[in-house]
């Protein structure tokens, strides 16, 4: 654990959790949605690009990039495209995207007209694409020179973060940035009122009435996207109650896991927040940005979100307004690891039917060069998968997440969202029922366990293990 305490990207040492379920190892995650139509191949094709001399001409022509326009936007990717074109005359790289880009990509993949490189976002089943042979195995490409013309490209990535993009030993996806999940508050607002961020559930129960007495909601949430509640409250408190064993049991759809005492107690904690009026009124109808706007405008004191929040809300932040990260309040007397930290990545892929994959890959090499990776960390306030990219003066919003990781004894991630999209939808619907008083905590657990049972009994659904 000493190496982990020296560098934020010692996460690499923990990412080996891809292959195991030790509480001290990363449970990996690649967001997804529904799969597209089958391809003829059952495995990812291999894209073989020979190791070129360092002075070899770069690939020319035109490459189309489609990217998810989420919390970090796509402006950085577009700027890199312009910079690439300037550095490589004769090449044209276009970057476009939107907040639901997967909706446009699915039919294009199905009819054989995909872009040359894509970052399809959480609504795409990345693993499904790989299993259908829709994306290249990039293992050999990682052996070719990186943007510096000397170092093998694969060696510029944190090695175990690359593993987050592997399926059955094939490098079907590549990481770019790393996200961390937690709760957020405005330190100036808290200081003005003499409040301290709650480290434990009991501290939250003491603080919340004080916040409410000031005419402010203690907590808001992104009601139209219930997975924020799953990521920010339900699963952290499940871990807090029962440890990583409880998380792994849920991820593996073990019989009874979703109605275990660990999940039930976590649901009861949400139920108590609901019944005591500690959630913002009407939050269930809010989008993610609406809820986060209410938080920034002082209507609520705290919100659960990932490290993308500043980038996503930069146009709403007031001049000089600060954001501070802290871990979800821990469970008093629980069996879980109080320093546990939840992380996530969103991968990039190269479709097998891309028209100019060589140029697209060369652009991605350029975008993942050390200088560009450092610029992304600084500009977008997030961590990157490139070695050395975080060795800069971190933005203020990243210092607390970095410290949380330094002190963490368990780093983990949710997998079931991309493994079992139908189950995930029912889980989210059940969460909405819970926060709107249409279900008790017990009814919530019973409903979710029924959905898990449906997964277990459906032989057409490929089963996974954390």
Image (spheres, helix red, strand yellow):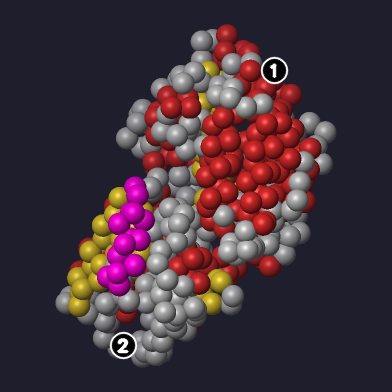
Whether the magenta-drawn stretch holds residue 56 is answered as: no
**Residue 208 image-quadrant placement:** top right
Q: Disc 2 designates what residue?
A: 55
Q: Answer with left or right where residue 104 lies relative to residue 444.
A: left
Q: Which quadrant of the structure image shows residue 29?
A: bottom right
Query: Is 68 above or below relative to 236?
Result: below
Q: Nearer the viewer, residue 162 or 106?
A: 106
The x and y percentages for residue 28 are 61, 59
Badge number at residue 224 = none
What range of the chain is rendered magenta?
99-113
| Residue 66 coordinates in the image, percent (x, y) | 30, 61
Query: Is residue 285 in view?
Result: yes
Mark 1 highlights which residue? 206
Mark yes or no: residue 14 visible.
no
On screen, residue 54 above or below 255: below
Horizontal relation, residue 94 to residue 370: left or right:
left
Q: Earlier in the sequence, mark 2 or mark 1?
A: 2
Q: Is residue 301 above or below residue 143?
A: above
- Residue 358: x percent and y percent? 32, 79
């Amino acid at each position: 654990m000493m190496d982990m305490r020296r560098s934020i990207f010692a996460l690499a040492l923990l990412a080996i959790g891809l292959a195991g379920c030790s509480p001290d190892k990363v449970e990996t995650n690649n967001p997804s949605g529904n799969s597209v139509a089958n391809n003829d191949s059952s495995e990812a094709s291999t894209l073989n690009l020979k190791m070129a001399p360092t002075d070899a001409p770069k690939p020319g022509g035109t490459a189309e990039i489609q990217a998810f326009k989420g919390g970090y936007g796509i402006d950085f990717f577009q700027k890199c495209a312009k910079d690439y074109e300037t550095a490589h005359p004769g090449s044209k790289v276009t970057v476009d995207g939107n907040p639901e880009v997967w909706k446009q990509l699915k039919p294009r993949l199905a009819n054989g007209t995909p872009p040359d490189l894509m970052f399809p976002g959480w609504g795409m089943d990345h693993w499904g694409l790989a299993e259908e042979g829709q994306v290249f195995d990039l293992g050999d490409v990682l052996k070719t020179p990186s943007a510096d013309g000397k170092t093998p490209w694969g060696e510029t990535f944190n090695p175990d973060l690359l593993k987050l993009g592997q399926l059955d030993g094939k490098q079907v996806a590549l990481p770019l940035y790393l996200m961390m999940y937690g709760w957020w508050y405005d330190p100036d607002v808290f200081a003005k009122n003499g409040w301290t961020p709650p480290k434990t559930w009991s501290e939250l129960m003491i603080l919340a009435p004080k916040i409410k007495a000031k005419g402010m909601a203690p907590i808001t949430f992104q009601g139209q996207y219930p997975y924020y509640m799953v990521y920010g409250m339900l699963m952290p408190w499940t871990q807090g109650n029962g440890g990583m064993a409880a998380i792994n049991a849920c991820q593996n759809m073990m019989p009874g896991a979703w109605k275990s005492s660990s999940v039930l107690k976590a649901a009861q904690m949400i139920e108590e927040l609901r019944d005591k009026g500690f959630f913002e009124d009407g939050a269930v109808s809010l989008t993610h940005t609406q809820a986060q706007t209410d938080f920034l405008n002082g209507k609520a004191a705290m919100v659960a979100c990932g490290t993308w929040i500043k980038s996503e809300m930069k146009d709403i932040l007031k001049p000089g307004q600060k954001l501070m990260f802290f871990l979800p309040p821990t469970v008093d007397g629980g069996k879980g690891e109080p320093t546990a930290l939840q992380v996530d990545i969103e991968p990039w892929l190269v479709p097998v039917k891309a028209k100019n994959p060589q140029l697209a890959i060369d652009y991605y090499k350029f975008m993942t060069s050390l200088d560009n990776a450092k610029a992304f960390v600084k500009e977008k306030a997030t961590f990157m998968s490139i070695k050395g990219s975080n060795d800069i003066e971190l933005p203020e919003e990243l210092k607390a997440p970095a410290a949380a990781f330094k002190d963490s004894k368990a780093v983990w991630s949710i997998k079931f969202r991309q493994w079992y999209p139908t189950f995930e939808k029912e889980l989210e619907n059940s969460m909405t029922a819970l926060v709107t008083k249409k279900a008790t905590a017990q009814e919530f657990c019973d409903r979710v366990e029924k959905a898990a049972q449906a997964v277990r009994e459906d032989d057409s659904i490929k089963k996974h293990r954390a």
